[in-house]
Amino acid sequence: MKNLSSLTVATFALTAGVLFNLGNAQGTVDHETAALKKDSVDVKNDRKDVRHNKAAIKSDKKDVKSAAKAADVAEDKLDASQSQLKKDSKNGADNHEITKDQVAVANDKHDLTVAKAEVKEEKAEVKHDKNQLKKDKKDLKKDKHDQKQNKSDLEEAKEQANHEAKEKAADNPGH
């Protein structure tokens, strides 16, 4: 009876150990599957970020062009105002007319300064978007690498789980 109970305990321990290892293998497969899904979502989001940044750069470049055109217009207007002031000063126009011309020149100088600042701001946005694009491309590359690694880990874990299941079946042919 003692031999029978120790044999039963040993069989039970062996079965529990195999099932425990099988559970670990299945847990590893589940973990790797979850990691692979997470990496797939990360890759998808990174691709979307890259696409959005490319569109933002394109839009910002258009804004730079339009701001540069506005600056050119402001500069031309300033030149015209300065010419008018010189012409009126040279022709001996009254003080009221000269003051009006001086105010126009001052306003045009201010408009030109604002337009140049806007061009500078738009160029900074383009630069920021380009840096963000580089960062997103780097993230995409890293996530693709992680996805590939997790895919191979998953395949390895599945093979290990299958191997352990076959071993269990071979060790317990009656079950």
Image: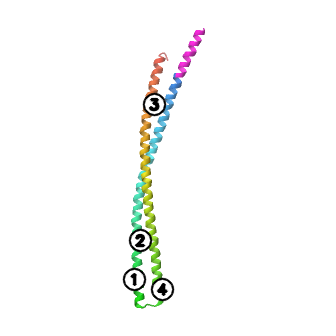
Q: Which residue is mark 3?
A: 157
Q: Are marks 2 and 4 in contact (CB under 8 Å)?
A: no
Q: Which mark is residue 99?
A: 4
In the rendered view, tell whether residue 69 sits above or below residue 6.
below
**Tag count in the figure?**
4
- Secondary structure at numbered mark 2: helix
Q: Is residue 65 above or below residue 92?
A: above
Mark 4 belongs to which amino acid? Thr
Mark 4, residues whose alpha carbon is within 10 Å: few (<14), some, or many (≥20)?
few
Q: Which residue is mark 1?
A: 83
Quadrant containing the N terminus is top right
Query: Is 162 located above or below residue 56 in the figure?
Result: above
**Residue at figure coordinates x 46%, y 68% from the top left:** 117
Between 71 and 169, the residue placed more toward the observer is 71
The structure residue drawn at horizontal position 39% and vertical position 80%, both measured from the top left corner, is: 80
Compare marks 4 and 3 and give the one earlier in the sequence: 4
Callout 3 amino acid: Ala
- Please name the residue that numbered disc 2 is placed on: 71
**Span highlighted in magenta in the image:** 1-17
- Say the numbered circle drawn on residue 30: none
Amino acid of disc 1: Ser
Q: Earlier in the sequence, mark 2 or mark 4?
A: 2
- Magenta stretch contains residue 11: yes
Looking at the image, which residue is at 46% across and 83% down?
Answer: 102
Q: Main secondary structure of the magenta part?
A: helix
